[in-house]
Structures are given as C-alpha cells and as structure tokens.
Amino acid sequence: MRTIKFRAKNINGVWYYGCLVYSNELDAAIYFQTGNGSVNVMDWVYVNPETVGQFTGLLDKNGNEIYEGDILDFNRLIVEVRFVRGVFAFLVNGDLDEELCGDCRTDLFAKVIGNVYDNSELLKEESY
C-alpha cells in the first residue's frame, strides 16, 4: 500500500508532517498524531500553502523520506524533486531530466541535502 502524507511549514517556520486538509472555506492545515505512545490524539496546525509537499514514497540512501520540494545530491548531480505532468520528477537546472527519472534508485544513489524553501541556494550551485 502506498503511504500518502504531506509536509508543510507553519507561520513560525516549523515543519509538520501528516494529512493535508485544504478547501475554499479552510486554509491549508496539517493534521498529525501526537501523544506519548500509550495515549495518542490528533492535532492540527495551519500551514503556509506555498510550502506544502507530498511524500514521494521514495527514500534516500540514508533512509530519509523524499518529499516534493526536496533537493537531492544524486551521484554528485544536484536535482530538485517536483510533481510534473502527474508524476514525481527530478529537475536539473529547472529542466526535467527524463533520463534520470527512468532509473531513480534513490535508495542507492540519492541523498536529501535540503529543500527549496530553506536551502534554495543549493540549486544555484553547479553540480560537482
């Protein structure tokens, strides 16, 4: 079964992970489980809709979840994760890299090094 979850930042810049709720009547919010393990409850927080990113279902080589908006070091190539034409894709210098998308063994070759909201300067660096 596919895990569907989102992340987004609240107005104080704190990341939250969970279910996304958004409508014309309600601003974007993330619902998440909180508690001490024996008693868990659901809580929610309003988030900045511009920072919402969906979990891709992929992990990097260190076991970190990869979200839309993440920046990856993919075998010394800096790529941005985006949702393009109905699928998650990798962009290099703002362009879709279809060759990389075809063989995306992120669990072997990619490492999350930041995201476009907190570390956009990483996209300006040349791949090394």
Image: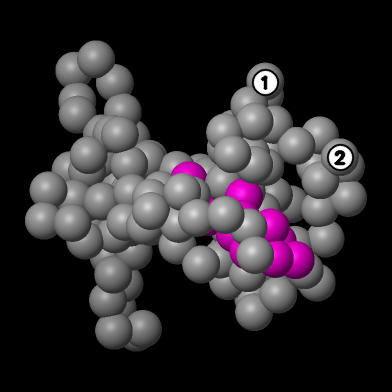
Q: Is residue 72 visible?
A: yes
Magenta stretch contains residue 60: no
State the image quarter where residue 90 is shown.
top right
Check the image and report above or below for 128 versus 31.
below
Q: Amino acid at mark 1?
A: Arg
The residue lying at 34 percent from left, 64 percent from top is 33
Front residue of this view, candidates 97 and 62:
97
Q: Amino acid at mark 2?
A: Glu
Check the image and report above or below for 68 versus 65.
above
> Which range of residues does the magenta coloring cover?
69-79
State the image quarter where residue 41 is shown.
bottom left
Q: Are marks 1 and 2 in contact (CB under 8 Å)?
A: no
Q: Residue furthest top?
A: 24
Number of other residues with Cα within 10 Å of mark 1, as a class: few under 14, some 14 to 19, many 20 or more = few
Image coords of residue 69 (percent x, y): 48, 45
Q: Position of 79 compared to 68: left or right?
A: right
Residue at image mark 2: 99
Q: How many marks?
A: 2
Q: Is residue 42 visible?
A: no
Image coords of residue 72 (percent x, y): 59, 59
Q: Which type of secondary structure does the marked residue at label 1 adopt?
A: loop
Q: Disc 1 versus disc 2: distance between alpha carbons?
A: 16 Å
Return the mark for residue 85.
1
Image coords of residue 120 (percent x, y): 38, 50
The residue lying at 65 percent from left, 65 percent from top is 128
